[in-house]
């Protein structure tokens, strides 16, 4: 698939310098123009896009011959319903307020200067992802609306579909009056091109990798550009001694089973020993009936004989599947210590009627989002009301949790005076 | 100086795991306790600290024998006045509001969950700097007040002074009731220790390098941890066609001469051709009288024969000294293009009476801080009213411009519900 690109360094430079020009133009582009391009994109996605279908068939055929599983092939397919959902997502983003230019703060200093803190785009973003082709459109729309040029590098199994989507995106930019250079895409599946891009710190301002362990590790090791990771979630739900056990059962079942393959799904259930005997056997029955494999501590296995034995390795594993660790703990403090030791600071929940316990858990569990009496699955830009997200940041600078439009911006200071000097 | 450290990997791990324990404790430490430790520190810095003087003498003697210049030796000396200024700085930080726990936003979603966005510390910060020993105290105080443990690595010429300051810092932490592990310092001048620290991304959350080109380049190349750079300033002042030329002269003189060795000092003066003949000769006289060496474009040299010739290299150089580039431009747009091409997106000013020109400059110059009718030297945490700063970020994520207490924090989400599930 990479026959057209032979010089990866040159390809990377072409993408990055084009993106920089695109970013400079886009930073000064009015909201109405950006929204017009997004509306054009939505229209084109649901129009008759024969070349989209053709490109997608190429990927699907290649996927079949490489033996991709049915669920993976389903994720890859660009169906009419899928394209309509993409278009709806783009229109949602068009309707969101433009973060660029927002006045974040303004104050006057004793010497008379006025300081304004104003939102501006970050600049050029390299977005590396493994997911379905719809992420291509989402990520482009969010970056463009927030005034950033984006260099997209999706999964190789969706290569032709993504290239075809780029054509639609660029047609829409042109039709809307936005610089086409705002959208760039790596034109080869050879990893060497990504390696070259990750060295271009003069031209690229931020790298966002979204995916599994290998992808994140490679990007973090190689990048000389700031990185915000969208990484694994080893998420917990702790059922406290005072929990409403009916609520606990619903919250735990939802956190594990509603969609097990995503980062905010529960991987470990912690139960206070005071309620373990009452809570665990019925809860385990429900999980087992839903096809969940259980891995328990010795006390769990005494109550739930069907449970396999958990190891220290289990506590650290993101299964992304119908497998669940279960551990009985002696106290709230032991639950917090377990989460801060084995978790990935992603999404962790407590079910309790004790307000003090809830507040201690919320304060001391060091995660991007802490949930009291609700499901970890609510950790999502849509559920939070952000309209859309590029993903959930697991880093501890710039943005934590869902990254939506404001999280794709930074600020500048504008200082207005009447001749003030430094004394 | 590094005879006590032989295993750099082990030393780095000891520092980083100690800092992580310190950070966990500090994140839950009340403001009053943190402020008590800061007050203790201020008291001890101005008390009789014979071992501080002794350690400083060792550094000064070593500096003299290594042939450090008089200004560098002056910067190194811990005088009584210097210690009193440090103590005053620490008390200022004690009086600033504690950013930790601040409620940044709170909203209720249609399904009834309440989402709170709360400021929390970043965690463990590795601060690498080249400057005077007072930076040691400032950086510690800012990191500690904002709930972060810090690993300090100062310039090797101040090694003994910094180690002695660490003793005072740790005595103050103990006296105030704060975990001593919140302050760590690299106990060797061997760079290998920094190299090992920069790989510990499990234990360290953020690296802040503050210094010159070589330091920043090395850290950026080696680090596997997120970095926020405090880097060079190639700063400009543009005198527009409509400028008040008296104001322009004062603003330009201040920006260049008041303290030329710092990152927000002006390195290049741009002058609109309409006022060049009227403005430049007198301005140049004043610069020359102050000992400033001028490097001009051909039109500048025609007006100011004493000016040497500027090259493209000149436009990119951060002199940090009494040297100034001067260029005559045809338009506001040419000035903006020059700044966005040759500048470092740090601090850039326009002097103009034309409000539209001012707004265009403020919008299109892509710098951390843009100044209208005032000096670039005002780009400073103190001047902005932040009380103190660890430095000026030249990066485009997390924080831009002065990094003070809030910029040393991040946030978490706390989501409170009554059994809500993901649908």
Image: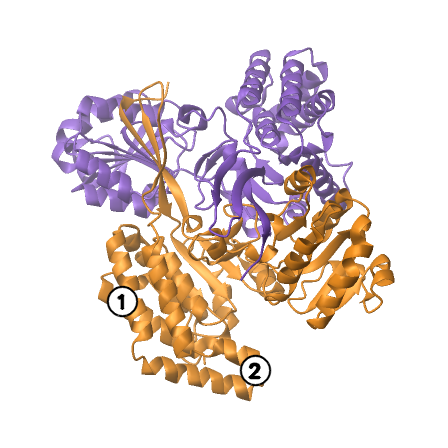
Chain colours: A orange, B purple
Q: Chain of mark 2?
A: A
Local packing at callout 2 (Cα closer than 10 Å; few below 14, some 14-19, many 20+) is few
Cα distance between the residues tagged 2 and 1 = 33 Å
The image's mark for residue A51 is: none
Label 1 sits on residue: A40
Q: Which residue is mark 2?
A: A70
Rendered residue at 38%/85% (across/down): A54
Is B328 on the left or on the right of B69, as rendered?
A: left
Q: Residue at x 52, y 42 (%)?
A: B117
Q: Nearer the viewer, residue A407 or B140?
A: A407
Q: Nearer the viewer, residue B249 or B18?
A: B18
Residue positioned 64% across, 25% down in the render? B34
Query: In the figure, residue B239 lies in which quadrant?
Result: top left
Q: Quadrant of the C terminus of chain A?
A: top left
Task: Report the number of discs.
Answer: 2
Rendered image quadrant of residue B302 = top left
Specify whether residue B387 is in view. Answer: yes
Kindly tell me whether residue A19 is visible in this rendering.
no
* Chain letter for the residue marked with disc 1 in the picture: A
Please indicate whether residue B112 sits to the left or right of residue B278 in the image: right
Q: Examine the rendered structure and indicate whether residue A374 appears above or below residue B17.
A: below
Q: Mark 1 falls on what kind of element?
A: helix
Depth order, front residue of B76/A271: A271
């Amino acid at each position: 698939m990479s026959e057209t690109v032979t010089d990866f360094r040159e390809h990377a430079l072409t993408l990055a310098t084009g993106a920089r020009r695109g970013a400079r133009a886009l930073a000064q582009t009015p909201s109405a123009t950006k929204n017009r391009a997004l509306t054009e994109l939505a229209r084109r996605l649901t129009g008759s896009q024969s070349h989209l279908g053709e490109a997608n068939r190429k990927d699907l055929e290649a996927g079949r011959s490489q033996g991709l599983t049915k669920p993976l092939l389903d994720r890859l397919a660009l169906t009419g319903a899928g394209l309509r959902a993409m278009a709806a997502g783009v229109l949602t983003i068009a309707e969101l307020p433009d973060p660029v230019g927002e006045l974040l703060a303004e104050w006057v200093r004793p010497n008379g200067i006025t300081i304004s803190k104003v939102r501006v785009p970050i600049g050029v973003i390299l977005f590396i992802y493994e997911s379905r082709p719809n992420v291509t459109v989402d990520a482009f729309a969010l970056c463009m609306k927030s005034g950033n040029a984006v260099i997209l590098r999706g999964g190789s199994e969706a290569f032709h579909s993504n290239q075809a989507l780029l054509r639609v995106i660029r047609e829409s930019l042109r039709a809307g009056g936005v610089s086409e250079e705002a959208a760039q895409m790596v034109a080869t599946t050879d990893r060497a091109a990504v390696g070259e891009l990750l060295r271009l710190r003069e031209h690229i301002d931020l790298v966002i990798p979204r995916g599994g362990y290998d992808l994140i590790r490679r990007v973090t090791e190689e990048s000389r550009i700031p990185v915000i990771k969208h990484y694994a979630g080893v998420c917990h739900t702790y059922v406290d001694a005072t929990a409403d056990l009916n609520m606990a059962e619903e919250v735990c079942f939802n956190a594990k089973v509603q969609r097990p393959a995503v980062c905010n799904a529960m991987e470990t259930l912690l139960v206070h020993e005071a309620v373990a005997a009452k809570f665990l056997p019925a809860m385990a029955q429900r999980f087992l009936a839903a096809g969940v494999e259980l891995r328990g501590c010795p006390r769990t296995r005494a109550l739930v004989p069907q449970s396999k034995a958990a190891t220290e390795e289990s506590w650290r594993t993101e299964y992304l599947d119908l497998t669940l660790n279960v551990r009985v703990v002696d106290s709230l403090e032991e639950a917090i210590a377990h989460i801060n030791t084995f978790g990935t600071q992603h999404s962790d929940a407590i079910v309790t009627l004790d307000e003090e316990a809830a507040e201690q858990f919320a304060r001391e569990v060091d995660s991007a989002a802490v949930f009291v009496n609700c499901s970890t699955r609510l950790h999502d830009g849509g559920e939070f009301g952000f309209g859309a997200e590029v993903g959930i940041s697991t880093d501890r600078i710039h943005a934590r949790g869902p990254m939506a439009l404001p999280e794709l911006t930074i600020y500048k200071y504008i200082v207005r005076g009447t001749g003030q000097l430094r004394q």
